[in-house]
Image: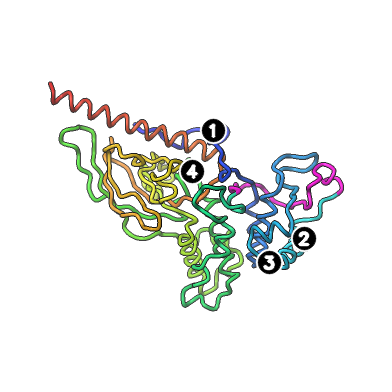
Amino acid sequence: MLRNLQGGTCAESREPPVTEDMKYFRTSSKTLQSLARLGRYEDVAGFLVLARHADGRALGSFAPYRLSGAGVNAIHEKSGVSEVVAREVIARLTSAGFIRSASEEAKKISPRARWEIVQQELDLALPHAFVDGPAPPNATPLSFLRRVRGSTEALKPSQLLRKTGEDALRLDMLMVILSIFCATEMNKFGGTSPRIAHRSWAIQSQIPAADCPGVVRWSAMPTGEWDAPYLAVASDWLPHIDPKEVLHAERIGQAWKSIAAAGLVYEAVVLFDDDPLTSSAARLLMTVRVNDFHAGSNQKMGDPSFLREDLGHGFYTQAKKGQPSLESMWVDLPRDRGHLVGIARPRLRASNPDAGAWLDQEKEAIDESLARLEVMKAHAFFREVV
């Protein structure tokens, strides 16, 4: 039987090997939501820059991620706003009580500290690349903040949103991608909760192998485009939008469209033992394929998946740079039950215990499935010989 990938706790899990792109910082979802309520994209972006450069250690009486050495120049460079706007951001964050000038006590403990950050519970882990951009030679050239700032999709909204300001659309996009990170549980879903965003995959056929008992060939295709029912999280993550606004749902849909167009998420086709949309007890079994050039089987550091290597157990056309994947696939599995779902994965993820547990158990489940297939085929071969 395939191992349940939800086993173990974060405390028991080792963190995966850390690259520059995967190092992470902690911040507060409640604090970010409070900032969004003020309605300015640059304020949320500027706060994220300060939080990224906050010290993750407990220093004297200061808790982790409370002392930051960043300032106007960092906000200007990393969020893509002018120096004038960056100064205005600092002024507004100070006036609203989200930051305050570093005290003498703070400067004695951390001479580089310029600001004391006022945050609530640190429940959100974001990769440094969210603010900094990935380190070379990785293919994604811009940070998430820069991609949101420069998103042409966000600035070319549907006809209904033509009167909505550019800053408001950027804020929508930023807060929705933050909600995606908040809802990402690698060890439980292999990405973002499918209740936040998913793509349905239909199993077209399951044909038992006539010459190899126990092996079943699955054929599958997606049934449509992404289903992103963000209304479930809008009240928390989009507090700047009045729920009674006529274009409320339209703005959420536009934010998702902009995120997908900017390449901030990609699809992984994941096998569950039951439908995770209807069963809270559904268990993640393993990733079958990854529909992305940069995270797929073309890349040495791509995500693990059952069809990552050409092992003769399935087929799909690998994604090519700048081109969409062909959708259909077939795969031989040592089981005839399960549910395939397209799960959204953030382009870059924090190298935290949740990701470490997922990576370990994903590889274990894939290896176990491949080993079972080889044993089944070997038994079938020897039966034929005898």
* Amino acid type, residue under disc 3 in the picture: Ser
* Amino acid type, residue under disc 1 in the picture: Ser
| Membership of 113 in magenta stretch | yes
Give SS at disc 1. loop
Residue at (53% x, 34% y) in the render? 9
* 169 to 384, vertically: above or below: below
Q: Are marks 1 and 3 in contact (CB under 8 Å)?
A: no
| Membership of 32 in magenta stretch | no
Say how the picture is coloured.
Answer: rainbow
**Distance of label 1 from label 4 (alpha carbons):** 12 Å
Badge number at residue 186: 4
Q: Residues within 10 Å of mark 2 (few under 14, many from 20)?
A: some
Residue 66 location, x and y as percent? 74, 47
**Distance of label 2 from label 3 (alpha carbons):** 18 Å
Give SS at disc 2. helix
Give SS at disc 4. helix
Residue 50 location, x and y as percent? 70, 53
Badge number at residue 82: 3
User: Is 24 on the left or on the right of 287, as rendered?
Assistant: right
Q: Which residue is mark 1?
A: 13
Residue at (47% x, 47% y) in the render? 191
Q: Which residues are magenta?
A: 104-128
- Of pointers 4 and 3, the one earlier in the residue sequence: 3
Q: Which residue is mark 2?
A: 94
**Distance of label 1 from label 3 (alpha carbons):** 42 Å
Q: Nearer the viewer, residue 124 or 6?
A: 124
Q: Looking at the rendering, in which quadrant would you find the N terminus?
A: top left
**Distance of label 2 from label 4 (alpha carbons):** 36 Å
For discs 2 and 3, the disc positioned in front in the rendered view:
3
**Distance of label 4 from label 3 (alpha carbons):** 36 Å
